[in-house]
Structures are given as C-alpha cells and as structure tokens.
C-alpha cells in the first residue's frame, strides 16, 4: 500500500473575488508520478506554491507527510521544505557558473560535505543524467534539453523526497519534451522520489502518470488513467477531452520507451 505524502483537505484559495481552489481534495502517494493538467490560469502553479508553503490556503488543510503545513511558519516550514526539489520553467541555472558549479551549489550551501565528496556526488549524478563530459560547459553552451537535465541534476543533489516540476518542458519541441519526460520517469524510478508534474503537454504525458489531476474552474478531479478521463461523464471533462485528446487514447498504444 502506498502512503499519502501530500493531501489537500477542503482547500480553498482565492485572490480577491476570484476563487482559484474551491474546496479541493487530493491525495498524492509516495513514489508515484502525478500529473496536474488543465487550461492555463486555472491554479496549477498556485497549487505548487501551496504545496511548498509559499502561499497559504484561506481554509482547509495541506498535509505533507501527515503534517499540516498551512499553519506552519519559520523554522518548521523550512524543515518541511527540505523534503522538496523543484524544477520550474527556466531551469534557473546561473549563467556565470559552469555545469559542475551549478550542480554543486546546493551541496556547498546546504551541507558540510568536503570538496572531494561534493565532486564525487556531482559527477555521479551528472553521469546518471547523461551529462558526463559536459561539466565544464556554461549554460549558454547547452541545448534546451541539456539545460533541463542540469536543472534536474541540481534539484536532485539534496536527495528530495518529493520533486515538483512546473511546466518543465516549456521552450522545447515535442520530441525533446518527450525525451525529457522519459528522463523524468527513468530518474524517478532510479531515485524513488514522489513526482508531481504540472503540464499542458496533453495528452502526451498522461501515460507516464500513475494518476492525473485535471484542474478546471476551481475543481480538481483525479483520474487513474487516460481511459478514465475519456470515459468521464462530467460535461467539463468531456469538453476537455474533445478539445485536447482527440480520438480515444489507449494507454496500451505506447508512444513511449520506458
Ligand atoms: N499572487 C497572486 N495574486 C493574485 N492573483 C494571483 C496570484 N497568483 C496567481 N494568481 C491568479 O490565480 C490564477 C491561477 O494562476 P496560476 O496558478 O499561475 O495558473 P496556471 O494554472 O496557469 O499555473 C490566475 O488567474 C492568476 O492571475
Ligand atoms: Mg502555471
């Protein structure tokens, strides 16, 4: 049985008169991949910020490993945040630092490891992400896909329990996006973290997920498979299927390696 790492219980979040999350309930299980999808402006990034404790809900509970973070502050909240690794749109690499230095940064800033140990860990992770031989390059010398890999390597250095990806393939062509999603999946299996991916690359990545959460007008619906989404009787989900998924899309028709 998988354990719940993150749970939203009746979470409400509004900005002014605009209700973004309207009594949302969701569960994300340990070691699984959850994709959060839906039209833009519907609260996907807000959800990520709520999970990280960067925003607070107006009401409801947000449990991380059973602890309600919605009322936590300061030290306690920082402690919980060490469980997370994040990879957002731009990869946020520092242009003036080499690949090696970018990836080493979290270890230098957040641990007391010695130089040799840091070097060993950085090189090992770069190797696992197919970046061996690129450690002395600078971000500007890398392709978009490689920058994402470096961003992922850096996010993994502190061995997060949970990885958050917010629109991680923005700026990549569809083929490269698929390659990156495959890499996420392989890496997730290797490292064993819980993965939450916000994406509008629909339906390409649904098959990578153990569950899909569709966000629409403040309501969050959880589905176990693409077929479940297509068979939903909710009118708003049917409209979503028609506009984004096209023909009935079977998860057995794998377009993926893995
Ligand atoms: N800090 C904020 N203050 C006011 N409105 C916000 C704030 N953050 C997000 N919003 C609004 O909340 C809605 C959802 O935003 P967001 O979660 O970024 O959407 P998306 O699903 O595209 O990631 C948008 O209408 C956005 O303008
Ligand atoms: Mg967003």
Image (tube, rainbow, N blue to C red):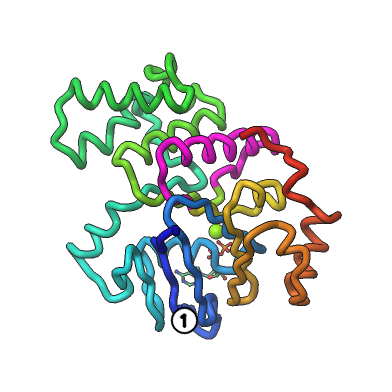
Give the percent coordinates (x, y) of residue 156: 37, 39
Q: Is residue 92 above or below residue 138?
A: below
Quarter of the image containing the N terminus?
A: bottom left
Q: Is residue 172 above or below residue 60?
A: above
User: At 20% across and 65% down in the image, what residue appears?
Assistant: 74
Observer-nearest residue: 76 or 227?
A: 227
Q: Is residue 37 magenta?
A: no
User: At 79% across and 52% down in the image, what residue appears?
Assistant: 249
Callout 1: SS:
strand
Q: Is residue 175 magenta?
A: yes
Observer-nearest residue: 223 or 124?
A: 223
Quarter of the image containing the C terminus?
A: top right
- Residue under numbered circle 1: 10
**Residue numbers of the magenta segment:** 168-195
Give the percent coordinates (x, y) of residue 52: 37, 61
Picture quarter containing residue 181? top right
Q: Is residue 14 above or below residue 176?
A: below
- How many residues crowd mark 1 within 10 Å: few (<14), some (14–19), many (20+)? some
């Amino acid at each position: 049985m998988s354990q719940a790492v993150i749970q939203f219980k009746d979470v409400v979040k509004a900005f002014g008169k605009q209700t973004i999350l309207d009594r949302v309930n969701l569960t994300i299980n340990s070691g699984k991949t959850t994709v959060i999808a839906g039209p833009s402006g519907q609260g996907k990034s807000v959800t990520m910020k709520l999970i990280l404790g960067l925003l607070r809900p107006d009401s409801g509970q947000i449990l991380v490993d059973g602890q309600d973070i919605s009322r936590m502050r300061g030290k306690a909240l920082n402690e919980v945040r060490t469980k997370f690794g994040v990879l957002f749109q731009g990869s946020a690499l520092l242009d003036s630092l080499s690949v090696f230095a970018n990836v080493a940064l979290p270890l230098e800033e957040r641990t007391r490891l010695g130089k040799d140990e840091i070097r060993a860990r950085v090189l090992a992770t770069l190797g696992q992400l197919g970046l061996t031989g690129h450690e002395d390059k600078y971000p500007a010398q890398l392709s978009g896909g490689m920058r994402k890999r470096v961003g992922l390597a850096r996010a993994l250095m502190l061995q997060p329990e949970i990885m958050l990806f917010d629109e991680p393939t923005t700026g990549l062509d569809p083929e490269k996006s698929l390659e990156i999603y495959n890499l996420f999946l392989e890496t997730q299996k290797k490292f064993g973290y819980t993965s939450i991916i916000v994406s509008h690359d629909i339906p390409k990545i649904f098959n990578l997920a153990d569950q899909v959460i569709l966000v629409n007008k403040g309501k969050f619906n959880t589905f176990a498979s693409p077929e479940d989404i297509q068979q939903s009787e909710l009118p708003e989900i049917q409209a979503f299927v028609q506009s984004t998924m096209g023909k009935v899309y079977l998860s057995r028709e794998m377009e993926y390696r893995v």
